Amino acid sequence: MKRTLLVLTLLGLSATAAQAASITTVVSANGNGGNYGGSLSVLNDGIFPTEGSQWNLADKVSWNGKGNRFVFAFGDLYRIDSVRLSVDNNDGYLLEYSTDYSAWASLLTVSSGVGEIGWGMDTMATDPSDSEYVSQLAFTPREARYVRIQATDGDNSYSIGEVAFTGERAGNGSTNPVPEPAGLALIGLGLAGMALVRRRRV
């Protein structure tokens, strides 16, 4: 019985270690001469603005025109599994990823009005288990060292409140799939059942 409990404990620990985690980022801006309002530090502080709040308050980065790009640097190569972001609801935004800061490819597009908020800031997520999930934002996990976001269309007044990434550090350029929680639960139940059978035999 003690051996079975040890196996279950180790299984639980390995499952926890394998779960995708928040990716720490450093934010910078390029384009348009830094013509924006607000501090870049609000974009990755873990705080999402209240939905429906005004687009140009101090807890957001806001600007006019399409010249700005905001870059999130991961510090290493990561597989991006999901994104959660807060943007002005009536504008379009493009997120692109890169491994070398030179070649960029599309990660996902936020279309104007795709969320559930009719005015102001809207929080959206690509993870189906998130309460802010928006299916139109779904993307295939990608390996990247950088992600940048820029406005693509709308009313020419843009705002970002937060951009958060979840994923795993990529090992030697390869990606290891995260175990499915349901699969781990079945393994745990199977081991527990084996323990009960063994206990009855003793």
Image (cartoon, helix red, strand yellow):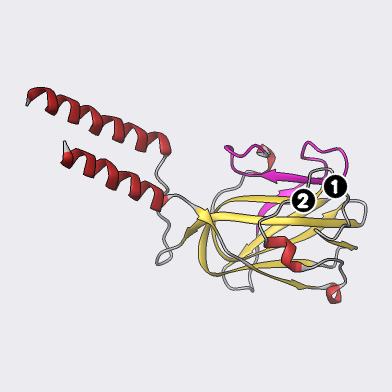
Going by the image, does 176 lie left or right of 9?
Answer: right
Mark 2 surroundings: few (<14), some (14-19) or many (≥20) residues within 10 A: many
* Residue 53's disc number: 1
Residue at 77 percent across and 39 percent down: it is: 115
Q: Position of residue 113 (x, y in %)?
A: 82, 41
Residue nearest the viewer, comparing 107 with 186? 186
Q: Secondary structure at mark 2?
A: loop
The reply to whether callout 2 and callout 1 are in contact (CB within 8 Å) is yes
Q: Secondary structure at mark 1?
A: loop
* Residue 146's disc number: none
Q: Position of residue 131 (x, y in %)?
A: 65, 37
| Residue type at the position of mark 2 | Pro
Mark 1 surroundings: few (<14), some (14-19) or many (≥20) residues within 10 A: some
Q: Position of residue 137 (x, y in %)?
A: 67, 44
Location of the C terminus by quadrant is top left
Residue at 12 percent across and 22 percent down: it is: 200
Residue at 89 percent across and 57 percent down: it is: 56
Query: What segment carries the magenta color?
Result: 106-131
Which SS type dominates the magenta stretch? loop
Q: Position of residue 126 (x, y in %)?
A: 63, 44
| Residue type at the position of mark 1 | Ser
Quarter-of-image position of residue 44: bottom right
Above or below for 19 versus 184: below
| Residue under pointer 2 | 49
Quarter-of-image position of residue 37: bottom right
Going by the image, does 57 lie left or right of 28?
Answer: right
